[in-house]
Amino acid sequence: MPIRQLSETMINQIAAGEVIERPASVVKELVENALDAGATRVEVVTSGGGLNLIRVTDDGSGIPEKELPLAIGRHCTSKLADNIDDIRSLGFRGEALPSIGSVSRLSIRSRTASGDSAAEIGIEGGRVLPVRPAAANRGTTVEVRDLFFATPARLKFMKGERAESAATSDVVKRIAIAFPAVRFTLAGSDRSTLELPATEDSAQGSLRRIAQVMGSDFPDNSIAIDATREGVRLTGHVSIPSFTRANALQQYAYVNGRPVRDKLIAGAIRGAYADVLPRDRHAVTVLFLKLDPAIVDVNVHPAKADVRFRDPGLVRGLIVGSIRQALADAGIRAATTGAAGMMAAFRPGATAYQHGGPANGHRSYEAAHRASGFAVYEQYRSPQWPLDMGFGGSGFGDNEQAAFDAGALASADARAGQDEATETLLGAVLGAARAQVHENYIVAQTRDSLIIVDQHAAHERLVYEALKNALHSRAVPSQILLLPEIVDLPEEDAERLAMHSETLARFGLGIERFGPGAVAVRETPSILGETNVGQLVRDLADEIADNDTVETLKERLDKIAATMACHGSVRSGRRLKAEEMNALLRQMEATPGSGTCNHGRPTYIELKLADIERLFGRR
Ligand code: ADP
Ligand code: MG
């Protein structure tokens, strides 16, 4: 076959292959057009999963009659002058309408504010029908019938009406979150009508729209984010660590109002929650990034859901940093409500008793709870254990290392004197360790209370304090790696790390450039023991990217210490021996601030024996 120029229709059908994957993609393109036209009301109707009918009606600017033939022409757009770096609309490629028109029966009826009447144009499988007068209010109605009738191969790939209409709902909800001031309705024989009344274009309006779409339990269980770095602004809401999903589908991200599915953003969210969520759980997030259109490329794929940032490290750092910060700030709140939550958690036992046993004649458990006041210990609680056991001033010495180190205390001597020792320990603030449950909680006993310690949180705090203390006296001891570890990472991150190599060296982290997009790690801080060097270096890069411009040196050092501490701590899931548990308790007593972890959550909770007795109706 000789080479020949493809027909206009063929070109459009080829483009449709990428832009119009399924009915939901048509809905996405048409709704985007309505929003670009400044609509305040957008109504979507579908039937047959969108394969029979898709109709999108808006009250936007409308299309002048003489421009209707252009609207369905390939590469015809009113949104792009001559600067591809300055895209402020959702559309810009001028190919949605001709693509849709090449694979379906499309009609556009429109009227502008100044037009005396409406006009209509049609295109069926690429064949353009003449413009004719029509009756309509201001705005545009686009109707798509028999989608893919002209491309039967694509039709075969449709998943069935239900799946297609679900995908359409998802598209409308996703975009509606970014336009709270626009009223959306989604109706038709495919579903019961979904109505999203207009709220306002403000933080509160946005949150109300989020609640309309995601349900009101999300706002109740989320934290607001608002941070700016180097002209990039991040706003939105992220779930508290106890509010999670089994997949990442409930993570909505927007770049300059455009819904995107971006690996970098997803990765940053994962990174931000890495220390507070198990691997198989996912946060629920709605994040809006606003930045100069010149530093983000949206022209990556015809569907426009992919973006590329000029400085990915900056964006990642911003997301990781501000989510972590928000979680830390909220952690203190959660901690104060922790005691109440704990009491509530105990209540079902009492309720069961009331149901099953003699309900009358028993004291009100409610009242008992209110009177008891479980104590959640926080920073204000000063350590009563002699301070010189700790890291105070002397740097991070061998003894302290040994305390973290499993075997050291499990000597024969220690075991021989155990009973005596236990008796003494009962007098200590955190008492004598009795058991470890669920591989993360140390249950200890004092003379008059039961203590529950979150071992991961506690250990993290101790490492953090030790690092900070050691820093003030002298450099942190490091261990030299037998083979330097080469870590690949974005060039900006490598550059940032290199710029801060002196600071990092003070922490015992020996790092240097290793060609473009990589660093070589030669030494790591001894206190961290065996650690995942790649992960540590990447987290530090995030931390530095986030704090580069604003933090003082001291704050930066503390943040670096905190990031390192996360890597050095006993993860939950490690079984501890009695000696190890007791060593941890003693370290906690000796360390100021150890009542809360680096994220502000309590590291331990104390239940007074008297309260426990009240719970059981013994008092
Ligand atoms: P793009 O959105 O990339 O410009 P489209 O093919 O989706 O390309 O639309 C072509 C043009 O038709 C748009 O640039 C716009 O001028 C006009 N248009 C399409 N839909 C609407 C609408 N709902 N209201 C007003 N104008 C519209
Ligand atoms: Mg468009």
Image: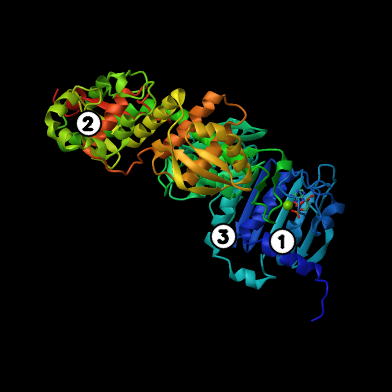
Question: Quarter of the image containing the C terminus?
Answer: top left
Q: Secondary structure at mark 1?
A: helix
> What mark, if any, has residue 100 been given in the picture?
1
Crowdedness near tag 2: few (<14), some (14–19) or many (≥20) residues, C-alpha within 10 Å: many
Q: Work out how far the residue at label 1 is from the one at label 3, CA to CA, in angstroms.
A: 17 Å
Nearer to the camera, 424 or 346:
424
Taking the image as drawn, is residue 207 in sight? no
Q: Give the label on residue 444, or none.
A: 2
For image coordinates 33% across by 31% down, the residue present is 398
Which residue is drawn at the image coordinates 73% and 45% (left, top)? 89
Per the model, the C-alpha gap separating discs 3 and 2 is 56 Å
Question: Residue at the bottom extreme?
Answer: 1
Q: Secondary structure at mark 3?
A: helix
Counting labels gives 3
Residue type at mark 1 is Ile
The three-letter code of the residue at mark 2 reads Ala
User: Which of these two is toward me, 470 or 182?
Assistant: 470
For image coordinates 53% across by 43% down, the residue present is 538
Closer to the N terminus: mark 1 or mark 2?
Answer: 1
- Mark sitting on residue 399: none
**Can residue 502 be seen here?**
yes
- What distance separates the C-alpha of mark 1 from that of mark 2? 68 Å
Which is nearer the eye, 120 or 8?
A: 8
Label 2: which secondary element: strand
Q: Earlier in the sequence, mark 1 or mark 3?
A: 1
> Quick one: quadrant of the N terminus?
bottom right
Which mark is drawn over residue 164? 3
